[in-house]
Every structure is written in C-alpha cells, then in structure tokens.
Image: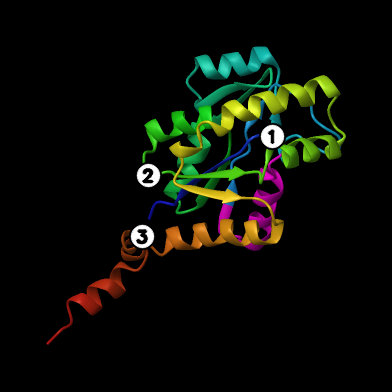
Amino acid sequence: MSGNLFIVSAPSGAGKTSLVAALLDSDPLVRKSVSFTTRAPRKGEVDGREYNFVSVAEFERMRAAGEFVESALVHGNHYGTSHQWMSARMAEGQDILLEIDWQGAAQVRRVHPAAIGIFILPPSYDALLSRLNNRATDAAGVIAQRLKNARDEIAHVLEFDYVIINQDFDRAAQELAAIVVAQRLRCANQNERHQSLFDQLLHPVA
C-alpha cells in the first residue's frame, strides 16, 4: 500500500513550521521529509533534523544528477527534496509530508498528481509582519523582503486543495490533523488498506 503525500506551504511567518511540528508530535504515522538547503543553520537547528545543510556546489551536483523531486530558490537560498528517499518511504506505506514553497509544490504535483496540497494563510498582512518581527531572527531588510515575497506566495493559494487560516494556533493545528485523517479515510485508501475486509463484506460467502 502506498502512503499519502502531503504538501504544506505558506508564506514566511504564517506559522507553517510550528503547525507541522504539532502534527508530527500528535501523529506518528506522518513522517516529514528533510529537505536539502544551502542556507546557513539557524540557532538550535541540527544538520539532518531540520534540514540537510549542503554547499551550493554540492546542491548543484545533486540537482544535475536528478536527485531532487523538486527544488527552488527561496529568499536567496536553494532547497530540494530527495526523490529516492521520498518514493522509498511512500512505497513502504509511510505518509510523507513536504514542507515546501509553492514552486516546489507545483513541481511535485507534476510527478505525484495525487499529492494533497495544504496552504497556511495568516489572518492579515499586519499579523504576518508582527510574527516576522517577533521571531527576532532576521534583519529589518530581510523582513521587508519576506513580506514582499509573501504577497507573491499568497497569490498561488488557489492552486492548493486545502487552506488553513492560522489565526488561532490550536484550531489551525486541529484542522491540519483533520485533513490528514480525512485523506486516510477516503474510500480508495481504506479499500487498499483493508482489502480483505472489503472483499469479505462486499462478496460474502453464501
């Protein structure tokens, strides 16, 4: 049985990373793909946990070798998802979550059209700016650029299957978990997962 593929995208500061972390804590059946990136690690980040941190030269080598199912340039840094790792985990029946931007989501959908796209929206641009300032991890110029980029990213929201407005974190986390559960309960997925039961109930022995 093949696992589900979930794509979670959002503009910077919308709360995507925190929501994904909450989902992973509450649902052991979901596994996050660890992207490769050329950006420097932030304080507290560990190589191989938040990201696989590589040089630009190594990233370019991997991309040229066709190792990424998607890759994108975001805020001046390269990000990419390993195709081999993701496909192997899904073939084992593992649900995989990709935390990527809209560019990467579009690339993945071309290869995996059944992927479930989820977009996280902030309740307003003012709230987004406040969250970016409160993170205290970026300079003012970087924050201004991220807010500008957010407008371009939000313009792609209608390309996704589900939208969560992250005004109240607990509610947004519940909604993200509900989407995952609902996908597993789709008839086709349940039939594949419980084929013997379906056969027994649909074709009872007289």
In the rendered image, which quarter contains the N terminus?
Answer: bottom left
Q: Residue beneath label 1, please?
A: 12
Q: Residue beneath label 3, please?
A: 189
Q: In this view, which residue lies farthest toward the top?
A: 57
Q: What crowding class fits label 3: few (fewer than 14 Cα within 10 Å), some (14-19), or many (20 or more)?
A: some
Q: What crowding class fits label 1: few (fewer than 14 Cα within 10 Å), some (14-19), or many (20 or more)?
A: many
x, y percentage for residue 184?
Answer: 43, 61
Instruction: Indicate whether residue 24 is drawn in magenta.
Output: yes
Residue that appears at 69% across and 61% down: 170
In the rendered image, which quarter contains the C terminus?
Answer: bottom left
Q: Residue beneath label 2, please?
A: 114
Asked whether the residues under the numbered discs 2 and 3 touch, taking CB atoms below 8 Å apart as contact, a structural biologist would say: no
Residue that appears at 84% across and 38% down: 135
Q: Is residue 82 visible?
A: no
Q: What crowding class fits label 2: few (fewer than 14 Cα within 10 Å), some (14-19), or many (20 or more)?
A: few
Identified by mark 2, the residue type is: Ala
x, y percentage for residue 143?
Answer: 78, 26
Image disc number at residue 162 = none
Disc 1 to disc 2, how far (Cα)?
Answer: 25 Å
Identified by mark 3, the residue type is: Asn
Asked whether the residues under the numbered discs 1 and 3 touch, taking CB atoms below 8 Å apart as contact, a structural biologist would say: no
The region drawn magenta spans 12-30
